[in-house]
């Protein structure tokens, strides 16, 4: 009989001896080379962590391969990061270079530290989600292939954190990323009255619409959508399968930039939309990879040392960003939802 | 199994970044379901749309969540993924593993499921991707035997997670690994049996660098901080100077409150402690020379969530400083969470995250409800309108009679 509510495995059983011995006693760290962190404890103990990118969606064979490496070089200990990277924990300095050689031989990607792009936090997309407006893993693969040189080096002005959400539910919480890739719908839901009649709580469906675009249709035992009010969030589809919103011709990707969650230097900030729509050109999304590369190259060319994307844009001004980036500014980029007014310029100073 | 072609997906096996397509193909060698997933996905790539349906209710005995039902929209064409459910497992704090544990996960999952995983899901769980309905209970029973438990799904406390903390970071201001473990265990019922208006998330970050992005990604963000003044080691400062590190440009000029000054002659760095807002920038730049103060704890923030429905919110401060000591079992924090959830449970509408409930009803009512006194650290600046909701007690205390006497 299964034990209920036993909770997660105890983390203490998962910590390598060097971590147990120096727990809470770490003094400083440095990054001797891209992808390698060196943590030094008060005791003088030194722990190397070698960071390896993964596709997040991995097979058990991949995990077993990784275990073989961890057994040989890390006494059987490793960890994952918040951004789906693996960190091999090396307590014996003599094993560091052999490990790096092994990883290279196995074709694993070492990087993602300091002034680099870390792995893109992302969602399920077409692989396993029921509400996606784009794929997740495929877009991430295409973008990371294109930007690989910024993953395994540290030549950016500052760290770059990217997120991808395949719909506005934003399970990947892309909304505070340096660069956010967001799947968007652009057409209202198509009502399937039969499906709604068969099994939808109509009051909940009506209440789910943030703009009040859905009202009950008692005669039909269904609902009516005021299409002028719909902003295609897809929340109604989450409430009822009778509100299909996917649209192969019109679904695609929006690009938002300048967010961060760290408090360092400036307060955490939201990403802001700079490109309202790019098409879902599977399998490699060339419009998306190109747009992101251009923004990153502009940032590299213009930012001061240590300036994250949002800090750079805020310093030069968004109006300046749009002219430098040669991106069209349109009414689609001016907020007309609930908290719009705080984004309007209530000052007579600005640039051209 | 007949080999079927996937020309579009095959294009995602080129390039330097590791390929999820290769991973699905590896799983497909042993699992027919993984093979069929490739076919469904190839079709999505050709048609530019998803093929998964809304979940029906699936689960294990005694729990209200932890398994997410997933069905393909054409079960006759794809019988092996007609049922392709997701199982969430609680991860060990900080995602530390020994290889024995990882191999156990692989072995059980190989026996009962597709062999595909997410390491890890956005909320932090180990995600096992794709199994049939009749396998769910056996999977849970075996994982339970091996020391694992299900994560959260639905309108419950979602699986908490934390940064690497004192396990490997000099910045950790409290024990995030223990806090996450302890709090997760305390609220097992809230996690496994959905009972609230909507989901609720907690993330533990050891310092204001917020490596779990708790401020954006959780309803309750617990961010490590300190209350006294940061500590500077002047000998180490001189070492940075000797190594040609530009302290003025990279540290002092970027300090948001300009509380640091560097004397190039004496090579000394000094701080005006009361001006510092503890943003972490200088410590990030000079970890060998600058460290947090000694009086450590955490700032508690509430309300973070993503876009759906009322826009994305970042969490805001409700307790500027709370001790987060292991010895007291994190009791003050747990008490606060109970009061917060009770208030939300009473006032929240269906599918309304706590930040949205507070926004709809007002921060004042929320603070009164959870019995927390207002302090200026909660706001960037006070209100610019005079629309105060006065209650009778306030009127009685501050009213003046017509003859000028106090009422």
Image (cartoon, coloured by chain):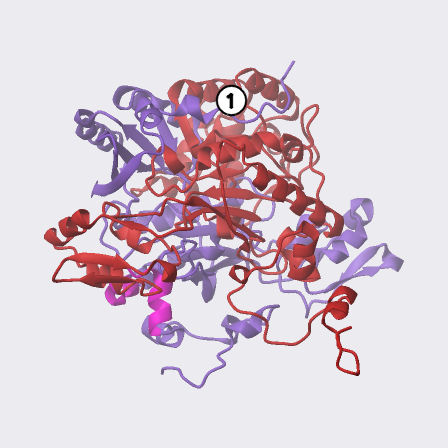
Asked where in the image residue B360 lies, by quadrant, the reply is: bottom right
Q: Percent from the top left, x then y, of residue A90?
A: 26, 28
Q: Magenta stretch?
A: A297-316
Q: Which residue appears at 64% of the width and 44% of the height?
A: B199
Q: Percent from the top left, x then y, of residue B24?
A: 44, 32
**Residue B2 on the magenta segment:** no
Q: Which residue appears at 44% of the width and 36% of the height?
A: B175
The residue at which mark 1 appears reads as B109
SS majority, magenta: helix
Chain B as rendered: colour = red
User: In the drawing, does residue B353 fall left or right of residue B3?
Assistant: right
Q: Percent from the top left, x then y, of residue A287?
A: 39, 59
Q: Which residue appears at 51% of the width and 43% of the height?
A: B203
Question: With respect to residue A26, does A15 lie above or below?
Answer: above
User: In the drawing, does residue B353 fall left or right of residue A344?
Assistant: right
Question: With respect to residue A263, does B117 lie above or below?
Answer: above
Question: With respect to residue B376, does B324 lie above or below?
Answer: above
């Amino acid at each position: 009989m299964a034990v209920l509510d036993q909770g997660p495995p105890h983390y203490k059983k998962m910590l390598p001896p060097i971590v147990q011995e120096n727990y809470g006693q770490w003094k400083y760290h440095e990054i001797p080379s891209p992808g390698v962190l060196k943590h030094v404890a008060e005791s003088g103990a030194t722990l190397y962590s070698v960071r390896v990118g993964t596709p997040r969606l991995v097979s058990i064979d991949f995990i077993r391969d990784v275990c073989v490496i961890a057994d040989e070089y890390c006494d059987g200990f490793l960890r994952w990061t918040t951004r789906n990277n693996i960190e091999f924990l090396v307590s014996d300095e003599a094993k560091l270079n052999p490990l790096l050689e092994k990883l290279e031989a196995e074709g694993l990607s070492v990087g993602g530290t300091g002034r680099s792009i870390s792995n893109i936090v992302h969602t399920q997309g077409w692989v396993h989600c029921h509400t996606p407006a784009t794929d997740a893993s495929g877009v991430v693969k295409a973008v990371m292939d294109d930007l690989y040189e910024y993953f395994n080096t540290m030549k950016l002005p500052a760290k770059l954190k990217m997120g991808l959400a395949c719909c506005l539910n934003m399970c990947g919480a892309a909304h505070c990323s340096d660069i956010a890739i967001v799947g968007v719908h652009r057409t209202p839901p198509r009502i399937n009255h039969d499906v709604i009649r068969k099994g939808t709580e109509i009051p909940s469906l009506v209440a789910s619409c943030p703009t009040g675009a859905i009202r009950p249709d008692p005669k039909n035992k269904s609902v009516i959508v005021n299409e002028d009010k719909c902003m295609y969030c897809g929340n109604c589809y989450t409430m009822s399968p009778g509100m299909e919103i996917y649209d192969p011709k019109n679904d695609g990707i929006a690009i938002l930039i300048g967010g961060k969650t760290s408090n360092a230097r400036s307060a955490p900030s939201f990403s802001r939309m700079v490109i309202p729509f790019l098409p879902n050109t599977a399998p490699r999304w060339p419009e998306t990879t190109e747009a992101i590369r251009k923004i990153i190259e502009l940032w590299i060319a213009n930012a001061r040392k240590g300036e994250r994307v949002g800090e750079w844009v805020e310093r030069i001004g968004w109006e300046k960003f749009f002219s430098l980036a040669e991106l069209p500014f349109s009414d689609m980029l001016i907020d007309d939802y609930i908290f719009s007014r705080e984004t309007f310029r209530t000052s007579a100073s600005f640039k051209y | 199994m007949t080999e079927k072609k996937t020309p579009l997906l095959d294009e995602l096996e080129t390039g330097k970044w590791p390929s999820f397509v290769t991973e699905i193909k590896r799983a497909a060698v042993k699992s027919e379901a993984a093979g069929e997933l490739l076919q469904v996905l190839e079709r999505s790539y050709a048609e530019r749309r998803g093929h998964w349906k809304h979940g029906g209710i699936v689960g294990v005995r005694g729990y209200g969540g932890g398994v997410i039902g997933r069905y393909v929209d054409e079960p006759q064409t794809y019988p092996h993924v007609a049922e392709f459910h997701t199982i969430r497992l609680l991860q060990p704090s900080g995602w530390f593993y020994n290889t024995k544990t990882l191999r156990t996960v692989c072995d059980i999952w190989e026996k009962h499921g597709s062999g595909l995983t997410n390491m890890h899901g956005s909320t932090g769980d180990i995600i096992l991707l794709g199994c049939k309905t009749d396998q769910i209970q056996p999977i849970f029973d075996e994982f339970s035997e091996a020391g694992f438990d299900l994560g959260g799904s639905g309108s419950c406390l979602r699986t908490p997670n934390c940064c690497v903390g004192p396990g490997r970071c000099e910045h950790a201001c409290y024990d995030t690994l223990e806090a996450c473990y302890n709090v997760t265990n305390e609220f097992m019922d809230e996690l496994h049996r959905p009972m609230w208006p909507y989901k609720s998330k907690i993330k533990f970050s050891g310092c204001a660098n917020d490596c779990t992005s708790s401020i954006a990604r959780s309803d309750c963000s617990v961010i490590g901080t300190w209350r006294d003044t940061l500590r500077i080691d002047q000998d180490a400062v001189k070492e940075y100077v000797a190594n040609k590190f530009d302290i003025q440009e990279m540290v002092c000029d970027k300090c948001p409150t300009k509380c640091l000054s560097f004397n190039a002659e004496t090579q000394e760095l000094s701080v005006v402690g009361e001006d510092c807002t503890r943003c972490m920038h200088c410590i990030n730049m000079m970890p060998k020379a600058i460290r947090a103060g000694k009086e450590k704890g955490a700032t508690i923030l509430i309300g973070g969530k993503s876009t759906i429905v009322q826009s994305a919110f970042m969490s805001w401060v409700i307790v500027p400083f709370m001790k987060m000591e292991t010895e007291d079992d994190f009791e003050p924090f747990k008490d606060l969470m109970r009061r917060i959830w009770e208030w939300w449970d009473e006032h929240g509408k269906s599918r309304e995250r706590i930040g949205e409930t507070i926004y709809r009803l007002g921060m004042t009512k929320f603070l009164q409800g959870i019995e927390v006194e207002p302090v200026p650290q909660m706001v960037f600046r006070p209100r610019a309108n005079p629309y105060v909701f006065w209650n009778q007690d306030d009127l009685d205390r501050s009213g003046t009679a017509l003859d000028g006497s106090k009422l």
